[in-house]
Image (tube, helix red, strand yellow):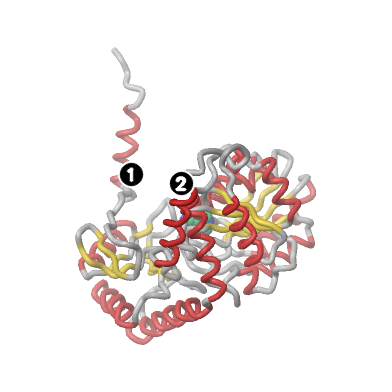
Amino acid sequence: MSIDPYAWIESSLSTIHRADWYRFEQTISSIPGAVIQLEGRTVINFASNDYLGLAGDRRLIAAAVFATEEFGTGSTGSRLLSGHRQLHRELEKAIASLKQTEAALVFSSGYLANLGAIASIVGKRDLILSDRYNHSSLKNGAILSGATIIDYAHCNLTELENHLNQHREKYRRCLIITDSIFSMDGDLCPLPELLDLAEKFHCMVLVDEAHATGILGKNGAGSVEYFNCSDRPLIQIGTLSKALGSLGGYVAGSATLIDFLRNRAPTWIYTTGLSPADTAAALEAIKIVQQEPELRTQLWRNIETLKDLISQQLPNLKLLPSESAILCLQLKDAATALAAGSKLKEAGIFAPAIRPPTVPTSRIRISVMATHEAYQLEKLVAAFKSLL
Ligand code: PMP
């Protein structure tokens, strides 16, 4: 009798279905923005990470088209072989200038930046301390590095200090890794206090600014700028795919670190360089973030308006604590979250359900954009009312 070695996949998929954890794509057929076409329906978009509305901005589109016409569609190889262009260097300089670091290195995604950076700077003899709610790319970077990993409770620096007291001395190097704004909760890591602990225990710190870049800080550089920590020793990671409206990721830090990663990070060395279109669009976005702080002001005005509307009209609604453009409505279980997502869609609101194993508890996740108009925020609150 022949045994099908792939049969387990179907049974595994059935288990995912039974738990209401089954995932699927929803097709958007319009340009990104506050209003989009979703599966043939016009909806207000509260699902994207395009916080400043730049992914559909004409200036980014023009930059991408120009770069494509000048330099072609693909970069044709690793940056160390045929894939390096002057545009990459310009983007790296712009990132370093925004982040107030000596240098930066652009990766093909934020995920790859985290994997490559973490796996290059620690190894088997080292310790990683990781916030339990960290993004998957930080967690998998930690696994890839081969270091010993200890998770600490979310933003709990007392627990972090206890682990450091107990374990730091047993290891050669120690790296603390954390999101700054947590992607599925919207709250903010207490970075200055975390850096104090790192200094006390001689640890490196890697902070992922994916959801903070373009949002926090006077110049939109992120939480490091917001907390006035730009001159403290740390490694900053980010993505070009959220507020910057493009694709790609980066590491920003000392010139020595960046030179080292250029020689060590496998997810930079052995992958194709970012396309000219993505590179040029990101470069344009950084200029806009620096030159148009009013976009950020508008985003924060919208966040405050939405929070006010919710607290006035829905005082019993259970929102998770947030210090960002991400607001989450906690729900009982995965089935309830899925049903809420469908109901919102019927009301013309796109706000997806986020379920385990991505998060410990199911929720509806709202992303506010600078380009949302007041009536769209009111429509969201009205749709929330119908859920109760
Ligand atoms: N870090 C965090 C905190 C994220 O939320 C994400 C994207 N979801 C990433 C890294 C990965 O970035 P990218 O989409 O550029 O791979």
Q: Is residue 343 visible?
A: yes
Q: What residue would you read off at disc 2?
A: 72
Residue 61 percent location from the top left of the image:
41, 61
Relative to 68, say whether 363 is above or below. below
The secondary structure type at the circle numbered 1 is: helix
**Furthest residue toward top:** 1
Q: Residue at x 45, y 77 (%)?
A: 299
Q: Residue at x 58, y 48 (%)?
A: 85
Is ligand 1 less than 8 Å from the beta carbon at label 1?
no
The secondary structure type at the circle numbered 2 is: loop
User: Is tag 1's residue or tag 2's residue first in the polypeptide sequence?
Assistant: 1
Q: Are marks 1 and 2 in contact (CB under 8 Å)?
A: no
Q: What residue would you read off at disc 1?
A: 16
**Furthest residue toward bottom:** 312
Residue 5 percent location from the top left of the image:
36, 23
Relative to 269, say whether 218 is above or below. below
Q: Nearer the viewer, residue 371 or 68?
A: 68
Task: Please state if 71 lies on the left or on the right of 351 as rendered.
Answer: right
Q: Residue at x 25, y 60 (%)?
A: 38
Which label belongs to residue 154? none
Q: Residue at x 57, y 58 (%)?
A: 238
Q: Is residue 206 visible?
A: no
Relative to 385, say whether 93 is above or below. above
> Mark 1 and mark 2: span between their CA atoms?
42 Å
Q: Nearer the viewer, mark 1 or mark 2?
A: 2
Residue 70 percent location from the top left of the image:
48, 51
Q: Amino acid at mark 2?
A: Gly
Residue 339 percent location from the top left of the image:
25, 61
Task: Name the image quarter holding the N terminus.
Answer: top left
Q: Nearer the viewer, residue 159 or 174?
A: 174
Relative to 106, say whether 154 is above or below. below
Q: Quadrant of residue 194?
A: bottom right
